[in-house]
Image: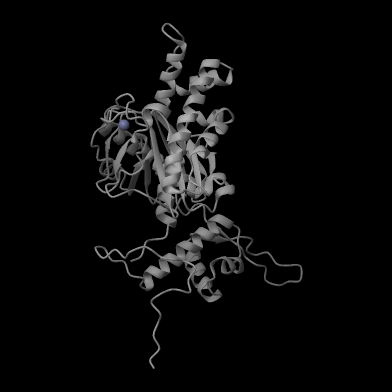
Amino acid sequence: MPKVTAIVATHSRHNFTRKPNLADVTVAGHDMLRLVNRRILLSIVSDRQPISRAEIAKISGLNKATISTITGELLKDACVIEEGLGRTTPIGGKPPTPLRLNSKRFGLFGLDIRADETILALSDFNNRIVSRVSFETESVATSFLSKIGKEIRKLQLKHDSFIEFPGIGVSLPGLVDNQSGKFLLSVVLPWRDVPVVNLLEKATNLPVIIDNSARCSALAEIWHGKAQYAHVRNLLYVSVSTGLACGVVIDGGLYRGGNNTAGQFGHIPIDLSGPECRCGQRGCWDLYASDKATLKRYADLRGPGGKRVSTMRKLVELVESGDASATEAVRETARYLGIGITGLVNGLDPEIVVIGGEITKIWGVIEAIIVEETKRNLLAPRSHHIAIRPSAFEVRPSLKGALTLIQNSLLSVPHMG
Ligand SMILES: [Zn+2]
C-alpha cells in the first residue's frame, strides 16, 4: 500500500476555514516558508527581547538548526544584534548571546493627518519615536503633501544612521481606498479624491501605505496594546471623535472589507425616527455618541443663551471641574456608546473592545455606564466576559497606528493559499 498523506487535518486543534484564493494564488514554496518563519522569529525577538536562541526554539517549536540558520540570516541582514558579545562566564565558558532587534535597522515614518493638526513622526525599529514635527493641516492637499515630502527628506538626511527607511504610514480622517491609494472624502477635511500615495511617493521616493484613523488605531492596539491584552486576536476599536468610526481586527489581521470601507458602524441606525444623518438615513449611532453629538447635547442642556463649548477637550475640562450639564452630556453619550457596542459585540464577538478619543480622558465617569449598558442586551453566555478598555495610547492613537502600518509591513505574516 502506498503511503498517503491525510488531507483532512482531524488531528489539528486548528479548524481552518480559509478558502484558497484561486484568483491570486500564493503557494507555500520554500521562499514563502522561509519568509513566514523569518517574520515569526523577528516578531518573537521584538516581543521578548533580549531572548536566547533556546527560548526562541521553545516558543516557536522550530528545531535548533532552523533557528540557527534564520538567526544567522537576520544577523547578516543587521535586523538583529547579539547582546553582550565578548563577555566570558566566571568559569571561562562561552556565554549565551541573547538577541535584540537592531533599532537602527529601520527608520519608520508615520504621518497622522487630522482636520486641524498633522503630525509627522520618525521611529526606530524598536518603536521609539526619535523625531516629531507638527503642522497646521492645510485645505489644499497637493501643496500640503509636497511640504510634508520635503520635511521627510530633511529628516532622512538628519537621521542618516538608519540603514533603511522602509516607508511612510499615513492615517487619514475619512474614507480611504487602499487599492488606488486615494483619500476619498471626509466630513472634517475638505479633501476629495486625493491620490495621497502617489503624491507622497513621488515627493519622497519611499513606499507609502494609507488607512483611515480608526483602522490605524485598531492596528496599533493589536500590535502594541497593553500587556493585559497582548495575546488578543479579535479586537473592536471604537474611535470617538467628531464622527464615530470603528476598526475591526479579526484573527490578528485588519478587516478592510470588499471595497476597503469597512468599519463605518457609526452609520448603523439606532432610531429610525431619529434626526436625519448626512449619510441619508435617520437616527445613525454617530448622531448620538460622537463628540459632535456630545457638544450639541451640552448646548441643549444649557438652553438658549447658555454656555457653549466648541471642542471636546474643553467639555472634558468642564466635566473634570464638576460642571453638572457637561457631566450629564457625557454620561448620556456613554449610554449610547454602550447601546451601539452591544450590537457590535453580539455580531462580531471580539475578545476586547477598545475605545479611543478625547472622551476616554474621563474614563472614570463613563466606564461603568458603558459596561452596564453593553452588558444589558448581550447574548448569553458571554455577558460577564466582555472587556471594554480605553486606548493604550493617551496621545494620538492614530499616530501610533500610522507608524504601525509600516511595522506591520515588515513583521506581519503573509496569507497563503
Ligand atoms: Zn448616517
Is residue 101 visible in the rendered structure shown here? no
Query: Quick check: 45 left or right of 35?
Result: right
Considering every residue shown, the one lying at the far top of the view is 305
Q: x and y percent of residue 2 in the render?
A: 38, 91
Q: Is residue 326 left or right of residue 288?
A: right
**x then y, percent, for residue 234:** 46, 51
Residue closer to the observer: 89 or 346:
346
> Which one is nearer the viewer's eye here, 153 or 129?
129
Residue drawn at x 51%, y 16% as measured from the top left: 325
Q: Quadrant of the N terminus?
A: bottom left
Image height check: is 49 above or below 64? Answer: above
Quadrant for the C terminus, please.
bottom left
Residue at 38% x, 77% y is 7
* Relative vertical location of residue 187 with respect to residue 298 in this rendering, above or below: below
**Quarter occupied by residue 304:** top left
Relative to 413, is 133 above or below? Answer: above
Q: Residue furthest bottom?
A: 1
